[in-house]
Image (cartoon, grey):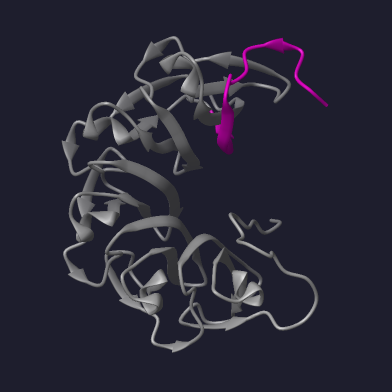
Amino acid sequence: NVTTKGSSMSTGVEGFAYGKDDSNNPRWVAVGNDSTAYGNIMWSDNGSCWVSTTEGDSFSANGNKVAYANNRWVAVGNDSTSQGNIMWSDNGSCWVKTLEGDSFSSSGDAVAYGNDLWVAVGDDSTAYGNIMWSNSTKNGTCWVKTSEGDSFSSSGNAVAYGSGRWVAVGNDSTSWGNIMWSTDGTCWVKTSTGDSFSNRGYGVDYRDGLWVATGDDSTAYGNVMWSTSGTCWVKTSSGDNFATLGNAVAAKL
């Protein structure tokens, strides 16, 4: 159904997350692009009537993704200040720009939580800054650029955690680098066996022993790939596929 009351984003919605506010009440949060900066983050207690944020911080340009875990929302996007490209909130309605540690100089594109760690990917002026992490102590308020192993030379587009492993997809100067994996979220490895996107990866998720990623490949079947390990990938070879590219993927809980 179409929402008929409250606020809505004038341009588009990029991400949703469901969680609990600081009083343990259910709450939805959406990020995207609105004609007013405060409208780039909205919240709802029922999913049918939405409210634009009116206090604290918000993205001056647009919000790209939001996630909830460990009693906190974390959102990434594009703001006029680099510190504003990662924001956090304990109630979903009032947001705070990160004020310490690192942040994306250009934009944050995706964020996920797993194994007591937040990981965010995006576009930074330094290649190592395209993947960042925040431990459970800082819980999304202070971030660190990766400084060892591999990282995307251009940008990271999506990240997910499952079965003791992180997987991120994005845009790298080598096709193998368009899918990367990590066991700890802080040191990353480019895939070196199996398939990878010839252009870039856009989406990735994990459930029940299977990783699935979507992106842009020189062959149509390569626009959707799968893996049981997260380190070695296989292009789909039967059924249907995207003729141009796949942007996102999600698994049912």
- Residue at 19%, 31% (x, y): give it: 99
In this view, the residue farthest toward the bottom is 193
Residue 210 visible in the displayed image: no
Residue 218 or residue 93, whichever sits in front: 218
Residue 30 or residue 197, whichever sits in front: 197
Residue 58 coordinates in the image, percent (x, y): 38, 21
Residue 199 coordinates in the image, percent (x, y): 45, 68
Residue 124 coordinates in the image, percent (x, y): 24, 49
Task: Using the image, determine if residue 190 lies above or below residue 154.
Answer: below
Q: Is residue 131 left or right of residue 203?
A: left
Task: Using the image, determine if residue 40 lies above or below residue 36.
Answer: below
* Residue 16 sits inside the magenta stretch: yes
- Residue at 20%, 54% (x, y): give it: 145
Residue 72 coordinates in the image, percent (x, y): 43, 36
Give the quadrant of residue 234.
bottom right
- Residues drawn in magenta: 1-20
Residue 51 visible in the displayed image: yes
- Residue at 30%, 59% (x, y): give it: 154
Q: Quadrant of the C terminus?
A: bottom right
In this view, the residue farthest toward the right is 1
| Number of marks drawn | 0
Give the quadrant of residue 59.
top left
Q: Is residue 168 left or right of residue 240?
A: left
Give the quadrant of residue 169.
bottom left
Q: Quadrant of the N terminus?
A: top right
* Residue 51 sits inside the magenta stretch: no
- Residue at 48%, 39% (x, y): give it: 66
